[in-house]
Amino acid sequence: MNSFTQLVRRSFGKIIAAQGSVKIADFEKIDNTLTPNMRALRLVMTMADQLSSMGMPAHSVTNLALNITDVYCQQKVHIDISYTQIFVSQDRGVDREPLTLIRTITPRETNYQFMQQLQDLSAKIANHTLTLDDAEKSLDKILSRVRRYPRWVIYIASGGISAGSAILYSATWPLVLIAFFVGAVTAWLLGRLGRLALPPFFTQVVASLFITLFASALMWFVSHGYVDFMGSVNPTLITVGGIVLLVAGMAIVGAFQDAIDEYYVTAGARLLRVAMMTTGIVAGVGIGLYASRKLGISFIPTPDRLTFASASYQYLGAVIISASFALGNHTRLGGIILTGATGLLGYYTFLASSSAGLSSIPANALAGITIGFIATLVSRVWHMPSLAIVNASIVPLVPGLILYNGLMGLIAPENAPGGDDLLLRAILISVAIAAGASFGVLVGRPTRRSFVLIRNSLPQWPLRSEDQE
């Protein structure tokens, strides 16, 4: 027994001695030993993630990212962008393993100043004016100092979109002020619902339901004589202004641009999101109108095309809508002025085309083409993303009134015909606007490139011809 005990003790002693002689390897943190190639890939991934999350078309993001990898990476890089993920792959030859990076795209608030800063950084890298160290420092500085307007400015901008929509149809200032108030409150409500992590579909339902019920309550107060000074207010236009506000942020142009550029997965996802959010608006407005009818509150007959305000007021409304949308997406002052002017030009094209005998669908398509073409040409000069100009300038063309009239036709107790046709017409007009704007951008790219080549042939400083937007 004593021999067995001694054997056990000697065995444990050898085990402990062996463990004590093992040397533990020192593992360094990977962040401190990244190769320049991996650092460049991470830089590209971060910039592509930020831009994609703000709605930039996948083709533009891919070109921007490849311009960076062509400068910093010796081996070619493949980049694939879907709606929710970014894939970056690099084949490093037969002697080294390939690299693949994947990042999930997190939706972020659109900020056109921030987007332009990232595009400027990409342009500097493509021009070989920044080392990798300087590029990383510049990106960190941009990410840490994002310029944003206060929330109350966003509420004012949202109110401006609703008020501008009301001005298109009526110059009654009590109506404009009420529409402004409803738009500002709706923006606040959307922010609160967003903090509760409510899905966008239900956010649209709740917001559109609030707008419709507010208009119904105003109708009740007016009909009972409690607010006589608002007797000339048409609650229908308040609802229309709210619809335009909710539709404005859908970024449908980016979705169609992805489809035209043959990024079908991303385009399909973005178009499905637009469809779901539009369905949310339809559901919210429909529920509100149905509830109002059940409570005995009947909206007055919806205005037709003849009830539009004079052309001067329509132009004023278009400028206010476009500029307010740009302000609400954190655009600098010069960009706000530019988007207002482009929105005015697009709306003028629409009115001129309508006066020339074109129906609403081709007239809106022609206005969209004009906006997309002009935005692509002037974006480089004004130092602003063309996407920002396009998205802001097409908002005055949104067929909010037709969409509302279609809903009224669907819920009418007498089952009045035309509701389905009006809804289909609203959808076709929206598609025509987005497709027209995308086509305008497509035509504007080679046109701008030709201007740049002509400019570079002159005995002056050359300009860049690469597309960054």
Image (cartoon, helix red, strand yellow):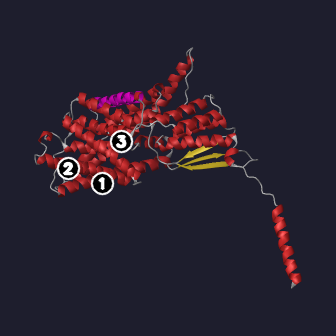
In the image, is residue 426 part of the stretch drawn in magenta? Answer: no
Q: Is residue 382 above or below residue 46?
A: above
Q: Are marks 2 and 1 in contact (CB under 8 Å)?
A: no
Furthest toward the left, the residue is: 225
Q: Secondary structure at mark 1?
A: helix
Hey, what amino acid is under mark 1? Ala
Furthest toward the bottom, the residue is: 1
Q: CA distance from mark 2 to mark 1?
A: 16 Å
- Magenta-colored segment: predominant secondary structure: helix
Identify which residue is drawn at 87% across, 74% down.
Answer: 10
Q: Secondary structure at mark 3?
A: helix
Residue 90 locus on image (x, y percent):
66, 45
Question: Which residue is at the front of the view, 343 or 450?
Answer: 343
Q: Is residue 192 above or below residue 385?
A: below
| Residue that carries the numbered disc 2 in the rendered image | 216
In the image, is residue 339 part of the stretch drawn in magenta? Answer: yes
Quick check: 64 left or right of 415?
Answer: right
Identify which residue is drawn at 23% across, 40% down.
Answer: 178
Q: CA distance from mark 3 to mark 2?
A: 23 Å
Q: Nearer the viewer, mark 2 or mark 1?
A: 2
Hey, what amino acid is under mark 3? Ala
What's drawn in magenta, residue-wise? 334-354
| Residue that carries the numbered disc 1 in the rendered image | 283
